[in-house]
Image (cartoon, rainbow, N blue to C red):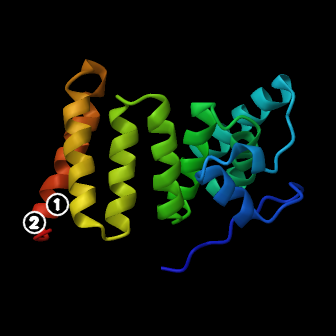
Amino acid sequence: MTALPVTSAGSGAAPEAFLDALLDLRLDQVPEPAIAVEQRNAMYEHVWQEIQAGRYDCAVEEAFHLAGSEPWERDYLLALACCLHHLGQFEPAAQIYGMALLLHASDSLCVYRIGECLGALEHWVEAREAFETAIDLAQLDPESRDVAIQAQERLDELTQLGC
């Protein structure tokens, strides 16, 4: 699969440098200026409207800006990971989901999404481990029952494929 280009126009730095700095947690090198709270809130609302409409290509640039502006804001990381995931950028999506997981270690849905990305990358053993972990974490939270069901379905699919 060919990776789709992701742009970050106006940031003053190449998108690859931005993503590398963000993924490496070199926050002093993330080339995003601070964005006012009101503007961030409006951008975040717009990003989720685009995501909910399935327009990930329209949301990804603003998601990059949000994550770069506040890299410790979990919701911004999840928005960016979601966009990258749906645009076929599975490796960086998994890494950013991982960063979000560090900020809330018991998030079964985040682990499940990592498993989806790993499966798309054909990292079967790691995907299986992620789905198993998602099931374990989901059992700690009654509201995560759907995640456990979906993760079990993915595990069953991997088993049927011989993975």
In this orientation, does residue 54 appear? no
Image position, residue 43 (x, y; %): 77, 36
User: How many numbered marks does the figure carry?
Assistant: 2
Dividing the image into 4 quarters, which one contains the C terminus? bottom left
In space, the residues marked 2 and 1 are separated at their CA atoms by 5 Å
Image position, residue 5 (x, y; %): 67, 71
Crowding at mark 1 (Cα within 10 Å: few <14, some 14-19, many 20+): few
**Which residue in the protein does label 1 denote?**
157
- Could you say whether the residue bearing mark 2 is in a helix, strand or loop? helix
Answer above or below: position of 118 versus 107.
below
Q: In which quadrant of the rendered view does residue 149 lie?
A: top left
Task: Say left or right for 70 vs 32.
Answer: left
| Amino acid type, callout 2 | Gln
Q: Which of 151 and 64 is in front in this view?
A: 64
**What's the residue at 62%, 46% (across, down)?**
25
Task: Say left or right for 77 vs 7.
Answer: left
**What's the residue at 30%, 21% (across, down)?**
143
Do labels 2 and 1 touch, CB within 8 Å? Answer: yes
**Residue farthest toward the bottom in the current orientation of the protein:** 2
| Amino acid type, callout 1 | Glu
Task: Say left or right for 27 vs 25.
Answer: right
**What's the residue at 21%, 55% (across, down)?**
128
In this orientation, does residue 163 appear? yes
**Which residue in the protein does label 2 denote?**
160
**What's the residue at 62%, 54% (across, down)?**
56
